[in-house]
Amino acid sequence: MARESAQAVAATQEEVEKVQIVTWEGGDPSVAEQRVAHRGATYLAFTKPRIWVVFAVEAAAGAMLASPAPGLVSRGLVGAVAAVALAAAGAECLTNVIDRSIDARMQRTRNRPLPSGALDVAHATALGLVLVASSLVIGSWLGAVPLGLLLVGLFDNVIIYSALAKRATPWSIVLGAPSGAVAAWVGYSSVHLPLSPGALLLGMFVMCWIPVHIWSLAWQYRADYGRAGVPMAPVVWGPATFRFAWGCAVAIMIAAAIWFGAVAFSEVLFAVVGAGAVLVGGLGLRWIASPSAQEARRVFGAVNAYLLLVLVVSMAAHA
């Protein structure tokens, strides 16, 4: 009996390593407890917390732009953050279900919960639908405009981008980018209507950031995407064409960020946005002039940091 339990624990730990989630630390919990913890960690990882947390921060930044008084935490802000987090997590679950055959063929993604067998399709789909439904319930409580924006974002991400465009065109991420703007607009419209120019520009900045982010990642894994038959821009376009398109995307993103900083009536925000633009632009020019995996990783990290910097400083400026 003890031997069987030990084998069960070992199998469970092997599964955890396979999906790259957690390792058990300290204590000597029972096999049942470990299985419950592993299952919960697998479901959590499946929702991609790093993605929905960013969109939740974007929603908070949008809501704080609309706050009538500094430091005011309204029910609209709390509701918008919850609705966006649930919608983004649910959308990730559903897109993972749609993309499972692609993920199974790519080295970077083949250990995700669905292709690795840690989750089955039925449970993954159910989780996504429950999260999306929960988001829409909160959205209906926030009002017609936030609810409508949530529906638009979900449709663009799950249907337009993942189900239709991703396998069909190198412009897929451009078509899916509008969903990135939704979080800021849900946040703002949950507190105040109509949307202000600052709120519109914050959403547009995130929308412009998404192609830069995805193309920076896709270039590093272009061979992987090619083997999987996904026509991402770095796979389909020639090197010169892709670098030109990526450079244009970076320029548009920076322009949107600076415009937002100018309209948001915050000298600190404008200064931070400008300084970040110089850094990202400089790294981008270096990569365009001499593309390499190391430079691509630097640009990818800088672009991600730039988004978080703009969102956090915007929140601090309007707190």
Image (cartoon, rainbow, N blue to C red):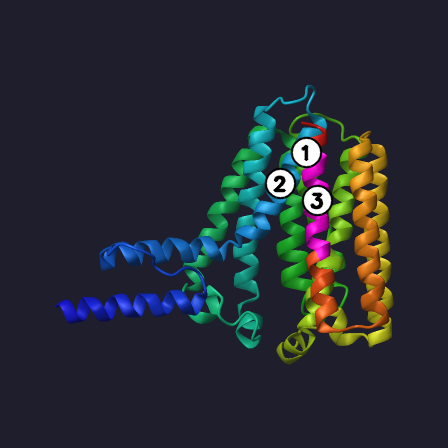
| In the image, residue 169 above or below residue 68 | below
Disc 2 designates what residue? 57
| Main SS category, magenta section | helix
Magenta region:
302-315
Lower position in the chain sequence, tag 2 or tag 3: 2
State the residue lying farthest toward the bottom: 227
Distance from label 3 to label 1 (Cα)? 10 Å
Q: Which of 297 and 162 is in front in this view?
A: 297
State the residue lying farthest toward the left: 1
- In the image: residue 295, left or right of residue 118: right
Q: Which residue is drawn at 82% across and 37% down?
A: 270
Distance from label 2 to label 1 (Cα)? 9 Å
| In the image, residue 70 above or below residue 79 | above
Disc 2, SS: helix
Disc 3 marks a residue whose amino acid type is: Leu
Lower position in the chain sequence, tag 3 or tag 1: 3
Rendered image: mark on residue 144: none
Disc 1 marks a residue whose amino acid type is: Met
| In the image, residue 235 above or below residue 138 | below
- In the image: residue 184, left or right of residue 122: right
Whether residue 39 appears in this view of the structure is yes
Lower position in the chain sequence, tag 2 or tag 1: 2
Q: Position of residue 216 (x, y in %)?
A: 72, 64
Q: Position of residue 142 (x, y in %)?
A: 59, 29
Crowding at mark 3 (Cα within 10 Å: few <14, some 14-19, many 20+)? some
Q: Which residue is drawn at 66% across and 73% down?
A: 221
Disc 1 designates what residue? 315
Tag 2 and tag 1, C-beta contact below 8 Å = yes
Disc 3, SS: helix
Disc 3 designates what residue? 309
Q: Where is residue 242 in the image (x, y as percent from the top left)?
A: 82, 70
